[in-house]
Image (tube, grey):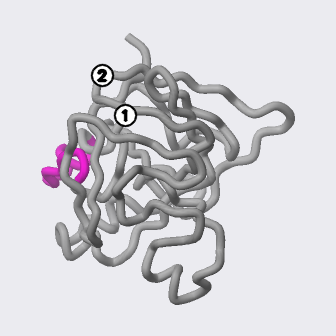
């Protein structure tokens, strides 16, 4: 079985977690319809304080469900939407994708990966010690971010749990993801 969407989540108000939905609608150039982080300009409060006119490279947050399995093995029960992601996937190495990779979600929606999520301290308020599990060090000692990837919507459409995820890699040299 190929890569699939396992959950979709959105929230119209600022909150660390996002309730699961039967479907979400992605809007080109904006993000998830009705989600507090949708918009052409940045919506994350910390980033708005830095520069409210910067482009929103974090319109849709995707997370791999395999992370929840890893966290459960370490004693952390986490479910889809609880870490603030909009789309949860299974069967796809999101963190291994290059910048600019495109994901077709369901029949119509297409997002382009802009970078890694850089989680904030709220993650430890959600579950004490969780930050160290989603931001750590790899074998070479470099910082490793595991809390999913961020994207922008290129083509809108409805996304539902069970939808297939198709990856289209960018042409030319591939560049590893950096935090956005």
Taking the spot 54% from the left edge, 22% from the top edge, the residue there is: 166
Q: Which residues are magenta?
A: 70-81
Quadrant hosting residue 40: bottom right
Quadrant in the picture for the C terminus = bottom right
Residue for badge 2: 162
Q: Is residue 140 visible?
A: yes
Earlier in the chain: of badge 1 and badge 2, it is 1
- On screen, 164 above or below 67? above
- On screen, 55 above or below 96? below
Task: Determine the secondary structure under disc 2.
Answer: loop
| Count of numbered badges drawn on the protein | 2
User: Which numbered disc, 1 or 2, marks the residue closer to the eye?
Assistant: 2
Taking the spot 52% from the left edge, 60% from the top edge, the residue there is: 58
User: What is the chief secondary structure element of the magenta stretch?
Assistant: loop
Q: Is disc 2 surrounded by few (<14), some (14 to 19) or many (20+) residues within 10 Å? A: some
Pick the residue in front: 153 or 125: 153
**Left or right of 32, for residue 6:** left
Taking the spot 82% from the left edge, 31% from the top edge, the residue there is: 171
Taking the spot 60% from the left edge, 52% from the top edge, the residue there is: 29
The residue lying furthest to the top in this view is 1
Task: Determine the secondary structure under disc 1.
Answer: strand
Q: For residue 157: magenta?
A: no
Q: Is residue 138 visible?
A: no
**Left or right of 143, for residue 159:** left
Could you say which disc has been placed on residue 89 in the image? 1
> Where residue 10 appears, x then y in whole percent?
29, 53
> Where residue 95 appears, x then y in whole percent?
52, 44
Pick the residue in front: 156 or 84: 156
């Amino acid at each position: 079985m190929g890569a699939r969407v396992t959950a979709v989540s959105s929230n119209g108000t600022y909150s660390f977690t996002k309730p699961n939905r039967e479907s979400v609608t992605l809007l080109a150039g904006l993000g998830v319809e009705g989600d507090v982080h949708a918009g052409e300009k940045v919506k994350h409060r910390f980033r708005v304080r830095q520069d409210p006119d910067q482009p929103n490279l974090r319109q849709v947050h995707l997370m791999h469900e395999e992370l929840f399995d890893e966290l459960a093995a370490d004693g952390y029960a986490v479910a889809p939407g609880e870490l603030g992601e909009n789309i949860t996937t299974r069967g796809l190495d999101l963190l291994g994708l290059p910048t600019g990779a495109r994901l077709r979600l369901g029949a119509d929606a297409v997002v382009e990966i802009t970078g890694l999520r850089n989680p904030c301290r709220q993650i430890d308020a959600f579950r004490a010690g969780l930050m160290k599990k989603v931001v750590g060090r790899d074998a070479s000692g470099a910082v490793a971010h595991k809390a999913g990837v961020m994207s922008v919507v290129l083509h809108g459409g409805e996304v539902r749990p069970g939808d297939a995820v198709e990856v289209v890699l960018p042409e030319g040299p591939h560049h590893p993801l950096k935090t956005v």
